[in-house]
Amino acid sequence: MTVKKLFIKTYGCQMNVYDSERMAESLADLGGGEGYVVTETPDDADMILLNTCHIREKAAEKVYSELGRYKGLKAAKPDLKIGVAGCVAQAEGEEIIRRQPMVDLVVGPQSYHKLPQLTAKAGLGQKALDTDFPEEDKFEHLKARPKAKRGPTAFLTVQEGCDKFCAFCVVPYTRGAEVSRPAERVMREARDLVERGVREITLLGQNVNAYHGHDGGLAGLIRELAAIDGLERIRFTTSHPNDMDEALIAAHGDCEKLMPYLHLPVQAGSDRILKRMNRQHTAEQYLGLIERLRAARPDLHLSGDFIVGFPEETEEDFQATMELVRAVRYGSAFSFKYSERPGTPAAERAQVPEAEKDDRLQRLQALLTQQQRALQDAMVGREVQVLFEKPGRQPGQMVGKSEYLHAVHVEAPGIGPGDLARVRIESSGPNSLKGVLLPS
Ligand code: SAH
Ligand code: SF4
Ligand code: F3S
């Protein structure tokens, strides 16, 4: 077998992480004695694949500067193939090859099952491009997943695409319309992952709570997954507030394997801005939803995404965001300066000056960091359950995650990746907690 080396660099969201895994698997055995193994460095690669993100201008520009860096490698090794996958591939298509002619292959997120053919075409020295939105479920046409042992946590994409069209966002254009994978396929893949050592599955979707591949929606799928022996934890991301139905709220209350952590982006706290963003809900509706979730699961940790400096955002609008953050008390959060995306409605509107955006971002991040730290510090003295993932820096130490996604360091002789244990938290550092093992 001629084994070639594949270097994949992944940008953007967790869905790209999952897709990169599946792409690597699909190239592992191409038949006729050909195949790729993954290498950790571009230097010895026969193929470099960038799995890209188009969400903000900076993310997209990174791709071109990264490609520039490979010029020397390509000159030294003319057989080296360079491919661009992901959301930039979908958004820019052929333009990528025009701007960077050394690119051999461009493949959009809905065409990954065509990667082996595209690779073969690139191997013949032709440019290979596919950014179609085919009808079929690409995951069903991708190679079956291998049976090798793997780490205790895994992502599993169950839903893709978005029909929401928030005024700032490129995702509906790069990932297409909402599609759900049928529950039985998800269940099959989940059982397979558990057999290979996975203990925690994070279900992924651009709007994962709009999942409709199960009669009972996402809550129905979660309950069915919870019945799998050996699967200990279930998480899901990312959710839209308007798709958070009663069944899913209830699952947070009584489904033990569903972890008490929820990423529920709101973007802004001003109704005027929410409306212009086309978010289709008010700040009050969002806060009401949080209240119902907390009634079902009082210790729920919330996480969110925020955009500051959306077109026409005033200081007063921004203050409404700060107020909403104060009301919710987030366990963690991501915040961004609004970035103009070509082709989206908001890009056409009056922009907030950059200095103003910077200033608002700083103030918001200071508040969010303070909240994050306060919630993390409040874990000291509490008992949590930790799923151990890997050895820590000190000998005998292991690192894992609590139910609330905090990283926890523990002196844990005899404990290995995939083990679950009760831990009492003793101290809180800048990014993680430290604790002691409790007798089981
Ligand atoms: N589907 C998810 C989020 C997808 S993008 C959801 O609806 O919540 C992840 C985050 O990137 C968004 O929540 C938003 O906060 C941010 N984002 C998207 N477009 C952006 C833009 N044009 N400028 C700045 N941030 C943006
Ligand atoms: Fe983008 Fe809005 Fe869809 Fe999220 S819900 S992916 S922010 S359009
Ligand atoms: Fe980026 Fe595409 Fe994900 S734009 S955030 S990689 S869906």
Image: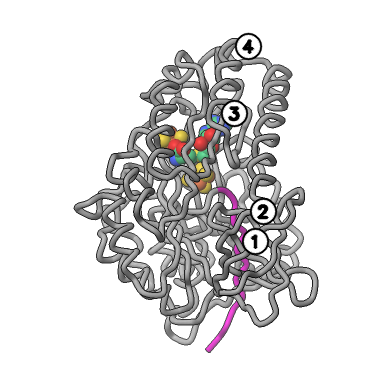
Disc 2 secondary structure class: loop
Q: Residue 315: which disc?
A: 4
Residue 165 lies, in percent from the top left, at 39, 30
Q: Specify which label sits upstream in the sequence, 1 or 2.
A: 2
Q: Please report contact status of discs 1 and 4: CB closer than 8 Å, yes or no.
A: no
Task: Name above or below for residue 433 compared with residue 422.
Answer: above
Q: Residue at x 60, y 17 (%)?
A: 318
Q: Nearer the viewer, residue 101 or 132?
A: 132
Q: Are marks 3 and 4 in contact (CB under 8 Å)?
A: no
| Residue 243 locus on image (x, y percent) | 33, 38
Q: Nearer the viewer, mark 3 or mark 4?
A: 4
| Nearer-N-terminus badge (2/4) | 4
Q: Main secondary structure of the magenta part?
A: strand
* Helix, strand or loop status at disc 4: helix
Measure the C-alpha gap from mark 1 to mark 2. 6 Å
Report the disc number at residue 424. Answer: 1
Give the crowd class for mark 3: few <14, some 14-19, many >=20 residues within 10 Å: many
Helix, strand or loop for disc 3: loop
- Amino acid of disc 4: Glu
Residue placed furthest toward the bottom: 1
**Distance between the Cα atoms at labels 3 and 1?**
42 Å
Which of the four quarters of the rendered structure image does ligand 2 lie in?
top left
